[in-house]
Amino acid sequence: MELVFFKPAGWEEWGLDHEPLIPEGMPVLVDNDLRFEDGPESPRPLVAVNQWLRELPSSGCPEPGSWRVYARAVRDWAVFLNDHGTGLFDHRSQLKSALSSYAVHRGSGPLDVRLAATTWNQHVSVLALFYRWAVAEGHAQAEPFTYRQATLFFADQVASRPVNQAVRRVPKPHVTIKYLEDDFTELFVRGLHGRGPDGEDERFRGRELARNGAVGRAALDTGLRSQEFTFYLAVELPPLPAKPTTLPIPFPVPSGIAKGRKFRTSWIPYTTLANLHQYRELDRALAADGSGWHPPERWGPPLLVTEADQWGGRINGRRLSWQELRPSERRRLVAPDGGSMLLAVKSDGGPFTAWPTVFSRTADRIRERFEPRFPHIHPHRLRHTFSMATLARLVGGYYQQAAQLVKDTDASAGLALYLAKADPLMVLRDLLGHSSVLTTEKYLRRLDMTRIYRDAYDRAGRDYGLVGDAAAEREARGEFDEEDEDLW
């Protein structure tokens, strides 16, 4: 079974009257014989799978990256069923038996097919979505999964939801999803600049260190996702204030590169934004200005830009806003002075997108030369780090001011008003681009949010003489959680 990705280029030569209603980049599953039916009235199950995939953009899944994940999960399942003589829409009893064998195959089969528990659970979720759709559309009689009812408690609300019995148990989320503490954060940023813990590293001769350090620091300080900082345009940088300021500066995240295509505004420290401007005006200009770079043909035709400003420019002669440009379009933009329009460029002026490799190699170098405990770094770990650092700052101020209100006025009404107007979770929700504060809370619980609140509460209480050294008392009683932070 083959998995291909649809491209509409050249459809006029396919003998069709109209362009196919299939989005560019949409996964398409094809049997090895390149046929979709065994006769005029005998469509194969893959026809239904491809229909389901085409409906994903209008069913709450607009991101092409997610389409690929969904398609690969269904393809692997369909191949396994076919190899064992079972149809994709077979009877429930057959599908349940196949699911049991598939779980064993993926859990303890050959190394090249094994899935970690979290990945297996993702595949189960995708297959459950597919079979629910197939049953509703009349393609399948039943799905192979069994469910139990789980009761959920939140504040004074009680709800129940079905839990798929095929999912595997995984460690507590905050054990597996990590962030960098302040000392490791600074070590990582220095590593991106090619320096060691003391600020110097004469043995390392890396390339594009100004770019790596400036963009890496910005990712840590803004919480942008990998796609967002990778495809940010140089002209989209907010202007640098005339004078340094201790207040963070609004940092717009265009909807075209944001998850779910939702525009939001993060913030960035003055020094971090100044470093980005310095990189853009010096190192980046040396690489891009006058560059003869053009996008390769496989990306599509180049998009030539003139009259560019922070908000838009003329693209092939037509005035357009940067806001709605998708990553695949942004990487084809050619600047008026030559080179890519992306903020991060290579030495030849072309777009640079290999951030996972840069972060991974930097972490490996730090671990090898300076700090054996240093963790593996992937782009989303920087977002986790931003979340925890920002929450710590918000909560620190939150409880400091709350404690001062209690001590100075002893007015519960004033404290209640403050708590209602300055909830750190609401601020962080907007910075991260979550649709609900409940999403933010669940996300933070994976990062040990309670530690942030506990530490801030204890610190504020000690500073204002409201409580004793509660942290020391808890430590003496052995009530700290058992997570070993040194194992990162």
Image (spheres, grey):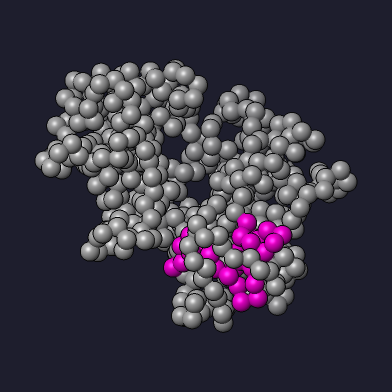
Q: Position of residue 290 (x, y in %)?
A: 70, 73
Dividing the image into 4 quarters, which one contains the C terminus?
top right
Residue 119 visible here = yes
Asked whether, in this view, residue 446 is left or right of residue 36, the answer is right
Asked whether, in this view, residue 277 is left or right of residue 136, the answer is right
Picture quarter containing residue 310? bottom right
Measured along the vertical axis of the image, is residue 186 above or below residue 364? below
Dividing the image into 4 quarters, which one contains the N terminus?
top left
Q: What count of labels does the image hold? A: 0
Task: Specify whether residue 280 is painted magenta.
Answer: no
What secondary structure predominates along the stretch shown in magenta? loop
Measured along the vertical axis of the image, is residue 5 above or below residue 427? above
Taking the view exactly as shown, the residue that stands out farthest to the right is 202
Residue appearing at x 36%, y 31% in the figure = 76
Measured along the vertical axis of the image, is residue 132 above or below residue 254? above
Q: Position of residue 358 (x, y in %)?
A: 67, 47
Taking depth in this image into account, of 143 and 333 the one nearest to the observer is: 333
Q: Which region is colored magenta?
A: 324-352
Residue appearing at x 38%, y 45% in the figure = 4
Task: Specify whether residue 326 is painted magenta.
Answer: yes
Residue appearing at x 33%, y 18% in the figure = 101
Q: Position of residue 60 (x, y in %)?
A: 31, 52
Residue appearing at x 36%, y 27% in the figure = 167
